Image (cartoon, grey):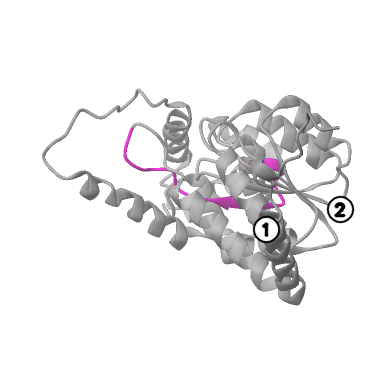
Amino acid sequence: MDGRTVADALRRRRADLTPAELRVAQALLGDYPVAGLRPIARLAENAGVSPPTVLRLVAKLGFGGYPQIQEALRAELSARTSGPLEGYPAAREDEPLVVRARSFESALVESQRAQDPAELTAAADLIADRERRVLVTGGRFSWTLAAHLASFAGLLRPDVTHVADEPGARAAALLDVDERTVLVAFDYRRYERDTIAFGRAAAGRGASLIVCTDPYLSPLASAARVLLTTTVEGPPPFVTLVPAFALVETLILGVVERGGKESRHRVADFERLNADVVDSGPAPLSAQPDECDS
């Protein structure tokens, strides 16, 4: 198979697919991976094609038949729902910690190699577009990615908001969502219902949705205008966000390059204002007026 997951293989082979095969791919990704676990006739019906078209797509992805792709999808479904206690590592003293940490480097290289340049360009274009307002959100752990992106993008262009992983904040953010809104949503397994619901609601109100997820795909991927994936495979028991942070830094670089003079002037203005705030901080205690004086 061309890719670590069926979804990954579908995106890599997208340019080689016929229009009918593309409809099958879209049907698969629209309810991934469950759509591929249904009978072949059901998948074909949902895609508006014949079963032989499904089999041709399966063959292009490198599978021997429909049962083989279903087996791969079942394994992915199991991986999506596995928790940190499954495969929890035993204590090891046979090699230095720094050696075991090299798996982060491998994950980073793998993710960068698999990144779709067209999707990355589209995401940077949307985030840098000053005619649009940008919302950024994440989940229990991925909020750090969202905050990082929002902090730097907000220095480079106006109207960027980090939406906290909290129901009230998300409901308030939806009030002003329209066709000029870009929502960047980070969602990695295990996927978070609140993030998925917020993203779908924003897309329903016209927002352009950029979904950053892992190769197993957040359910929010089906609503995405742009889909960016990075591996999360690292030292157990937890997933790693190292490749995802590199993706965020790459998006920031894209916004810098597209910002031109406006972004440079905005950063310079921030530096000046920040220096002014520091220089005009609170007066020393000895210089404070005595509340007893009248």
**Left or right: 273 with respect to 2?**
right
Confirm whether residue 122 shows in the render. Answer: no
- Is 120 or 136 nearer to us in this picture? 136
Q: Which mark is residue 279?
A: 1
Name of the residue lying farthest toward the front: 293
* Other-residue count near label 1 (Cα within 10 Å), few / some / many at <14 / 14–19 / ≥20: few
Which of the marked residues, 2 or 1, is nearer the chain's N terminus?
Answer: 2
Mark toward the viewer: 2 or 1? 1
Q: Secondary structure at mark 1?
A: helix
Name of the residue lying farthest toward the bottom: 261
Residue 237, x across and y down, in percent: 34, 31
Q: Are marks 2 and 1 in contact (CB under 8 Å)?
A: no
State the extent of the magenta-drawn residues as a range.
221-236
Residue 221, x across and y down, in percent: 64, 42
Placement of 78 over or under 132, stated as above or below: above
In the rendered image, which residue does mark 2 sit on? 180
Confirm whether residue 68 shows in the render. Answer: yes
**Left or right: 25 with respect to 61?**
right
Q: Is residue 161 magenta?
A: no
Three-letter amino acid code at disc 2?
Arg
Residue 92, x across and y down, in percent: 16, 34
Q: Residue at x 67, y 33 (%)?
A: 196
Q: Is residue 234 magenta?
A: yes
Q: Residue at x 48, y 32 (%)?
A: 80
Q: Residue at x 50, y 51 (%)?
A: 245
